[in-house]
Image (cartoon, grey):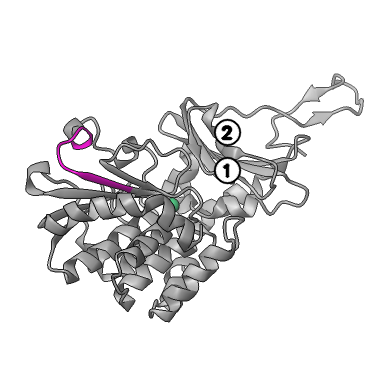
Amino acid sequence: MNDQKFYEQFSREIFSAYQSLYTARRILLVSHQKPDGDTAGSAMAMAEMLQSAGKKVTLFCKDPLAEEFHFLPKASEYVHSFEISDYDMAMVFDAGSYKMIGIHEEKPTFFSGGIPLWNIDHHVSNEKYGTWNTVCHDCASTTIVVAKILRILKWKIPPKVATPLLLGLYTDTGSLMHSNAVADPHYEASRLLSAGADLRSIVQYIFRTKSIEKLKLWGRILSRVSLGDDLVATSFIRDRDFEETGGSVDDLTGVVDYLNAVQGSKLSLLLTEKSGKVKGSLRTLADEIDVNAMASTFGGGGHTKAAGFTVPGKLHLETQWKISSLKPGIPENFETAGIGRR
Ligand SMILES: [Mn+2]
């Protein structure tokens, strides 16, 4: 979304939220569970910004931040628990559902007026659970929403703020290669680079560094890719793959883009079985396909080109291989236990 439209749609709300931000002394900055570069980048950028303005800030995420984000100084400041009464205001970044924060059972009042809450996001499925909801569906990352907010507030972006903002922009657009990387994200990236963002470190630590466990896990996923008659490129990973490779669920980020690369595929689906649940990650590059709608039929959501869902259960392998040649002792259409489709 260009700046003009963004201003028209969100400036009133931003100025209203800013009244509260201006008077607040202690501010909680919240990233969603299983933090990615966008939720962490937005929160860390805002932490730098508000600290420079003399505010006391705390970065919260239920889960630890992945090692790859630790090139940013704020990454080591995250805490994993907090008391609502210690804060005057909270800001939540990139969490489409309040449940993604992982505290709704333990701290229900956080979402019902406990403290003023500024929900800043770009998911189509956002539940608008905040006191203010700056939810820009047409923004490719939450860090872009934050950059636009900072410009509306006329706050100059220093390099230490530009870098985490560019991080979220890069991770949410697949290094400006996904279909959401239209003109505006390039424009935002250009502005952040002009403001001194450290793209070299982002490329080095986020895109060019992978643990051996991650590569082994990706290897299993890639070796199981199959393309169905429905033109869906599918692969899967199960509990025991995590055990055997030493990889974690966090290591899966990014692999689904490789599934999308299967020639002739219309969309890709990665099924992850972990601890009695099956998670589906859907991606597409096709204009006419809305994977958010598909994910929502399973109670999930996300974006039109990238979405996911989680259902309780286990994965079962259905046999696709058949031996149809007749040899003595083997009946016709005898099914063997194979892996995947041809
Ligand atoms: Mn995001």
Q: How far from the left and from the top, in percent, is residue 151?
A: 35, 67
Q: Which residue is mark 2?
A: 293
Q: How far from the left and from the top, in percent, is residue 294?
A: 59, 32
28 vs 298, left or right, is: left
Q: How far from the left and from the top, in percent, is residue 336?
A: 74, 28
Q: Is residue 114 shown in magenta?
A: yes
In the image shown, does 237 or 79 lie closer to the viewer? 79
Q: Residues within 10 Å of mark 1 (few under 14, many from 20)?
A: many
Q: Amino acid at mark 2?
A: Ala
Q: Which residue is mark 1?
A: 304
**N-term-proximal mark, 1 vs 2:** 2
In the rendered image of this protein, does residue 128 appear above or below residue 168?
above
Region of the chain picked out in magenta, as a range: 110-119
In the rendered image of this protein, does residue 33 appear above or below residue 8?
above
Q: Residue at x 42, y 74 (%)?
A: 192
In the rendered image of this protein, does residue 239 appear above or below residue 323?
below
Q: Residue at x 55, y 26 (%)?
A: 297
**CB under 8 Å between callouts 1 and 2?**
yes
In the image shown, does 214 or 163 lie closer to the viewer? 163
Which quadrant: the C terminus?
top right
Residue ranking furthest to the left: 85
Q: Residues within 10 Å of mark 2 (few under 14, many from 20)?
A: some
In the image shown, does 11 or 316 lie closer to the viewer? 11
